[in-house]
Amino acid sequence: MAMKPNLLGPGGRLFAEQQPGKDEVSFRVDNTSEAYYNSPYYELHKNDLQQIPAPRKNVSMQLQLADFTGPAIISAIQQAGKITFHSVGDTGAAKVNREQTVQRAIQNEAEVADAMANDVATGGTNGPAFFFHLGDVIYNFGEGQYYYDQFYEPFRAYDRPIFAIPGNHDGMVFGQGSSAPQVPTLEAFLNNFCALTPGQSPDAGGLVRSVMTEPGVYFTLDAPYVSIIGLYSNVLDGPGVISSQGGKFPIVDDQLAFLKSELQRLTPDRNAGNRAVIIAVHHPPLSVDALHAGSTGVQSDLDSVCQEAGLWPDAVLSGHAHLYQRFTRIAGPNKKETPYLTAGSGGFAATPPQSTVGKAPITVGNDTLVVDPIVKFGYLTVTCDGKTLCVSFKSPAPNGGLATLDSVCVDLTAGKIVPSGGAQKSGMKTKSPRKTSK
Ligand SMILES: [Fe+2]
């Protein structure tokens, strides 16, 4: 049987190996960068933010999906009347210690990446159109030499574009002197995701995947039925920071003006029933995980900008916390219900929530933790037809199948979460929670 050709995007963009090999069992370059935590520069500056690289000059801050996938995928989405895409963060396999072998670390990421690639392969032009990465692509310090082991090799079969916002680990820096980092912040991320042209990456180890041409580390992806505004929340383990927060942080490149103008730009099309508007930011504004609490400053920034723009997001997606969490936040004059989903479950680690967290649902103020956090590796599948937005969390099951462990749908017109079982009535198909399927 003739082999099906892989996707060829505009400008010669390629995304996957034609014949991907088996998952590897050892790293090409052993990751030793945990040692950088002890370097003089990091020791002195570990609580400092890093400057945000300016977006490239004279390029649009809005990416069009069609410029990456080409017209056939876009036509298929429009014909189907809906789009599907993937999202997850914290994919980098690097955590090797007394409890976890190299093989296990590689496998944790590979199981997620392979399941995502399989969704694309089996879905064809009606399957997921892209993967929006929620940051922490590479551990521990975002170095170029680990892109092969932690990114290009695991996603070698994923035949669709991968967009990304950086996480703290992608921007962290180290150095043997105390005054300047050895490598500028985000250097490898910029080379691999914010390149001028879609050529081959020197960090890909010969694997096929064109570098991405994002304008910078914050941008908007416009696709049929959905726009994703991606923000960069800087390098601290916590909290995430997207602005100076009224002078509290020395951030020059404030992303709030960008966010406000994007919300205003998207409002007419969103309110006409043509698209959902999603915000993606690495550090979760709401979180009950044991290591990272929610970034209240980011939440406060989002609230004030949404208030000014008069538009609240239809969903907020984050990584950073190494588990799955789903909150509903009620905000705005119409008490809009927005799901806040954390999926830092892409392969680096699976970390339990705070031991003091009780059983869901738990409501504090406007925020409700809707389901008990799920401490498993897995990823989000998002589907939208402009009227309803659905998100499900899928996890590779031990039998080689895939378990859908949680799902939520939002009625975009009403701005309300669809009661369980209502998604099918609205025409969108979603699987019931807690059922396992192949
Ligand atoms: Fe992170």
Image (cartoon, rainbow, N blue to C red):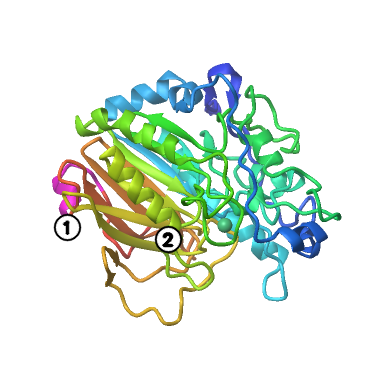
State left or right for residue 97 relative to residue 110: right
Disc 2 crowd rating (10 Å Cα; few below 14, some 14-19, many 20+) is some
Residue 312 in sight = no
Element under label 2?
helix
State left or right for residue 78 relative to residue 177: left
- Residue identifier under label 1: 419
User: Disc 2 vs disc 1: which is toward the camera?
Assistant: 2
Which residue does the image show at 74% across and 34% down from the upper left? 206
Q: Quadrant of residue 314?
A: top left
Q: Quadrant of ligand 1?
A: bottom right
Residue 12: where, in percent of width, then height?
60, 19
Residue 294: where, in percent of width, then height?
44, 63
Element under label 1?
loop
The answer to which of 252 and 427 lies nearer the viewer is 252
Q: Which mark is residue 296?
A: 2
Which residue does the image show at 36% across and 42% down from the upper left? 278
| Residue kind at label 1, given as amino acid type | Pro
State left or right for residue 52 relative to residue 62: right
Residue 404: where, in percent of width, then height?
36, 58
Looking at this rendering, what residue extends furthest in the front direction?
247
Which residue does the image show at 78% across and 49% down from the upper left? 181
Stretch in magenta? 421-429
Query: Disc 2 or 1, which lies upstream in sequence?
Result: 2
Residue 147 sits above or below residue 168 on the image: above
